[in-house]
Image: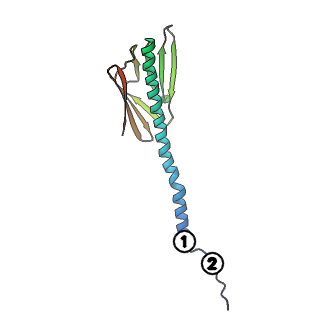
Amino acid sequence: MEKNRLCAFTLLETVTVLLVTVLILGIPPILLKGFQARQEMDQAIKLTKAELSHASYYATLTNCEVNIINARESHLLIFYYAQKDRTTKIKKVQFSPRVTCWTTYDNFHINQEGKMSPTTFTFNCDGKTRQLKIQMQWGKQVLNEISS
């Protein structure tokens, strides 16, 4: 006599497969969120460095001041480039809404020689903080980045 035996998975096998599936599908979104925050903060720091260097060169070459305002609520830095004809060119550096930027002073300027007072930009995104310290050495702008 032949037994009619049904083949099926046991409860333990089913639970194990479901657990592994949940882990495989659940971990990447968590890691992706941290990666995106790091990328957004890197982008904000790169934009700030580039625009500060450009403003310093502009002030030196044109012999005109550049005023900078940190608009924290709007997540942007506003650069006011004075021009010889007494008009002002405005350049805005927009950050991601998740990135917040604090500066030592909310308003500061780069003089006609391309020099500015030492200041620190502090960037925060999802609990991670990085600082960009700006100093003048030998008449040249030095940007030092500090991670915390």
Task: Determine contact: label 2, label 1, CB under 8 Å.
Answer: no
Q: Residue at x 46, y 22 (%)?
A: 54
Q: Hey, what amino acid is under mark 2? A: Cys
Q: Residues within 10 Å of mark 1 (few under 14, many from 20)?
A: few
Q: Residues within 10 Å of mark 2 (few under 14, many from 20)?
A: few
Q: Residue at x 46, y 17 (%)?
A: 58
- Quadrant in the rendering for residue 110: top left
Task: Say whether residue 137 is left or right of residue 48.
Answer: left
- Quick one: 142 or 33, which is closer to the camera? 142
User: Which quarter of the rendering shows the C terminus?
Assistant: top left
- Quick one: 27 or 73, which is closer to the camera? 27
Q: Hey, what amino acid is under mark 1? A: Glu
Can you tell which mark lies on residue 86?
Answer: none
Can you tell which mark lies on residue 13?
Answer: 1
Q: Residue furthest top?
A: 85
Task: Say whether residue 115 is left or right of residue 16.
Answer: left
Q: Residue at x 51, y 13 (%)?
A: 88
Q: Earlier in the sequence, mark 2 or mark 1?
A: 2
Please state the horizontal and vertical placement of residue 96, each as a whole percent of the image: 51, 34
User: Which quarter of the rendering shows the N terminus?
Assistant: bottom right
Tell me how far mark 2 sits from mark 1, CA to CA.
13 Å
On the image, numbered disc 2 is attached to which residue?
Answer: 7
Q: Residue furthest left?
A: 138
Please state the horizontal and vertical placement of residue 102, each as a whole percent of the image: 41, 30
Compared to 62, does 1 lie above or below?
below
